[in-house]
Amino acid sequence: MKLFAILAAIGLVFCLACGGHDDDDKNNELMAPGQNCLACHGSFRVAGTVFGSATADSGSGLAGITVIITDANQVDTTLTTNAAGNFFTTAPLALPLKKAAVVRNGTRTEMTGPPVGDCNRCHTLPATGGASGRIHLP
Ligand code: HEC
Ligand code: HEC
């Protein structure tokens, strides 16, 4: 009976550890900076991460940066990066996109026509699709 109680206690500790893992900060808007969000999030229309340089460490995403996406109908959607540098939206932007821009203090850096909004597919390390690396500030 004593042994059973000990085993039950051990099981409880493991269960708590397990529950704690599920409830940590891993699966939320701060997750996976620099990774291709749309690979897992089919409901996101546009998502990515902004850094200080093309080769920045994945943990160094920048908060509070303005990202402006211009869709096929020339409608602008303005997003702001969160504490991890991530930005994302499920708004039904019309594809193909016309422009994607990052703005700091009125200085704008942009690209023309990313076909779809999976920004970090190309802007990652190592970069693909001809990108020089991560999306970064001017
Ligand atoms: C390898 C797969 C994967 C990648 C890559 C990924 N996520 Fe997630 N994300 C998940 C899973 C799994 C959950 C938890 C299940 C859920 O709530 O959908 C989650 C949850 C979330 C949530 C909370 C629930 C929701 O759907 O709104 C947000 C917000 C989020 N992720 C944003 C991002 C962002 C932004 C990126 C890219 C920087 C990203 N994720 C990259 C798998 C991923
Ligand atoms: C198919 C690949 C691809 C996708 C997807 C893509 N880009 Fe780009 N992006 C490029 C290339 C190529 C350049 C030009 C070379 C460079 O500067 O990296 C570029 C340049 C940029 C620049 C200017 C310089 C820089 O790197 O900061 C910004 C800003 C930018 N992209 C933002 C975005 C955003 C936001 C998205 C998502 C809506 C996106 N890109 C999706 C390939 C891509």
Image (cartoon, rainbow, N blue to C red):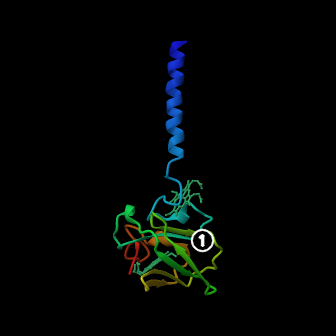
Q: Which residue is under mark 1?
A: 45
Indicate which quadrant contains ligand 2: bottom left
Count all numbered tags in the image, as a single digit.
1
Q: Residue at x 37, y 76 (%)?
A: 132
Q: Position of residue 86 (x, y in %)?
A: 48, 66
Q: Name the residue nearer the viewer: 21 or 118.
A: 21
Q: Is the CB of the residue bearing disc 1 within 8 angstroms of ligand 2?
A: no
The answer to whether 127 is drawn above or below residue 6 in the figure is below
In which quadrant of the rendered view does residue 133 lie? Answer: bottom left
Q: Residue at x 53, y 45 (%)?
A: 22
The answer to whether 126 is drawn above or below residue 20 in the figure is below
The answer to whether 63 is drawn above or below residue 96 in the figure is above
| Residue 46 placement, left or right of 84 | right
| Residue 45 placement, left or right of 122 | right
Q: Where is residue 70 in the image (x, y as percent from the top left)?
A: 57, 83
Q: Position of residue 41 (x, y in %)?
A: 58, 62
Mark 1 Cα shell of 10 Å, populated few (<14), some (14-19), many (≥20)? some
Secondary structure state at the residue bearing disc 1:
loop
Q: Position of residue 102 (x, y in %)?
A: 46, 79
**Looking at the picture, which amino acid does disc 1 mark?**
Arg
| Residue 41 placement, left or right of 127 | right
Q: Which residue lies furthest to the right in this view?
A: 92
In which quadrant of the rendered view does residue 109 lie? Answer: bottom left
In what quadrant of the picture does the C terminus appear? bottom left
Q: Which residue is drawn at 45% across and 67% down?
A: 85
Q: Name the residue nearer the viewer: 130 or 52.
A: 52
Q: Name the residue nearer the viewer: 25 or 98.
A: 25
In which quadrant of the rendered view does residue 116 lie? Answer: bottom right
Q: Which residue lies furthest to the top in this view?
A: 1
In what quadrant of the picture does the N terminus appear? top right
The answer to whether 105 is drawn above or below residue 86 in the figure is below
